[in-house]
Image (tube, grey):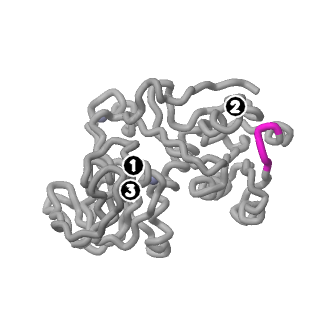
Amino acid sequence: MQAAVVPAVSSSWQVKDVPQPQPGPNQVLVKMHASGICYTDVHQTLGRLPGPFPRILGHEPVGEIVAVAPDVTMRKVGDRVGTAWIQSTCGRCEWCQRGRRMFCPYLKSTGVDAQGGHAEYMLMNADATYLIPDKVSYEQAAPIFCAGYTVYSGLRWADPKPHERVAVLGIGGLGHLAVQYAKAAGFETIAVSHSPDKDKMIRDLGADEIVRDGKSLAAAGGCRCNPQYLKFDQIDGGQHTGIAAGRPARHDGRRCGATFDLADGSHLETHSNHWEPAKRPRISVRSA
Ligand SMILES: [Zn+2]
Ligand SMILES: [Zn+2]
């Protein structure tokens, strides 16, 4: 099969012939129909995140199952599936027991420990696959497995209550999905955007209000919940202006696991066991 191989750190990707993998226990072989590109691919290519070279990246992969291992009963040939960042975890460590598998020290992740989706075929662990509804195209589905999953996780961990407002900071690759999820979940949704040229698009996505910064967020009444809490550390000088009580998305003071597109176009990556203590973002909750 052909695959986009990253031969070495900071090198160009090369389309090469590589052996087609065969499913082992609990695995399915997927013919790729789409494989999203994430800025994490750039970090990985530049060696900013751990992982061996040569390697095949791609952690937003979707396609059709063409073979299943004999022990797989939950998926069948012909299923339309995708997989997310986690292929497997140990199931026994503190983090797994606490339901926070993304911090498991034995985490095997897509495109890092397991071959990624920038190839004609890839293996997915059957229990790490998700069925894609027939009405959703592969192209639409692919980014959901990183960008969508990330912001939905943030929203879920932030655990907003029905009366609360959700602020989404930066309406880019992740934020444009977060606005739609927050709105679809029934929350009053405030977009924080520096880009007036995006206002129409942001309204079309369902945002109830658009503000430019923390001050105007506070003036608009503030919010009690921001699923991308870390972003406020980045662009608002850590003041968390306008946030009455942030429930941080996916961090617990020890480790983090989330990715964020920042409003200035930069990207913050906070993946669990990749953080060394000195690099961990400051985490705090402050009342406005
Ligand atoms: Zn990603
Ligand atoms: Zn574990």
Asked if 262 appears above or below 35 in the picture, the reply is: above
* Label 1 or label 3, whichever comes before in sequence order: 1
Of residues 80 and 116, the one nearer the viewer is 116
Q: Is residue 185 visible?
A: no
**What type is the residue that disc 2 sits on?**
Gly
* Mark 3 vs 2: CB contact within 8 A: no
Quarter of the image where the C terminus is located: top right
Work out which quarter of the rendered image holds the N terminus and state it.
bottom left
Where in the image, quadrant-wise, is ligand 2 located?
A: top left
Which labelled disc corresponds to residue 59?
3
Q: Is residue 65 left or right of residue 210?
A: left
Q: Position of residue 18 (x, y in %)?
A: 19, 67
Q: Position of residue 38 (x, y in %)?
A: 47, 57
Q: Secondary structure at mark 1?
A: loop
Q: Which element is circle 3 on?
A: loop
Q: Residue furthest right?
A: 219
Alpha carbon of mark 3 to alpha carbon of mark 2: how far?
32 Å
Residue appearing at x 57%, y 54% in the figure: 174
Residue that mark 1 sits on: 46
Pinpoint residue 190: horizontal percent, then vertical percent: 74, 49
Amino acid type of the residue tagged 3 in the rendering: His
Is residue 153 visible in the rendered image? The answer is yes
Q: Which residues are magenta?
A: 211-215
Label drawn at residue 237: 2
The question of residue 243 being in magenta is answered with no
Alpha carbons under labels 1 and 2: distance apart: 28 Å
Q: Label 3 CB, ligand 1: below 8 Å?
A: yes
Depth check: give the residue in front, 179 or 17: 17
Depth-wise, is mark 3 or mark 2 nearer the camera? 2
Say what secondary structure mark 2 lies in: loop
Rendering quarter of residue 228: top right
Pair 1/3: label in front: 1
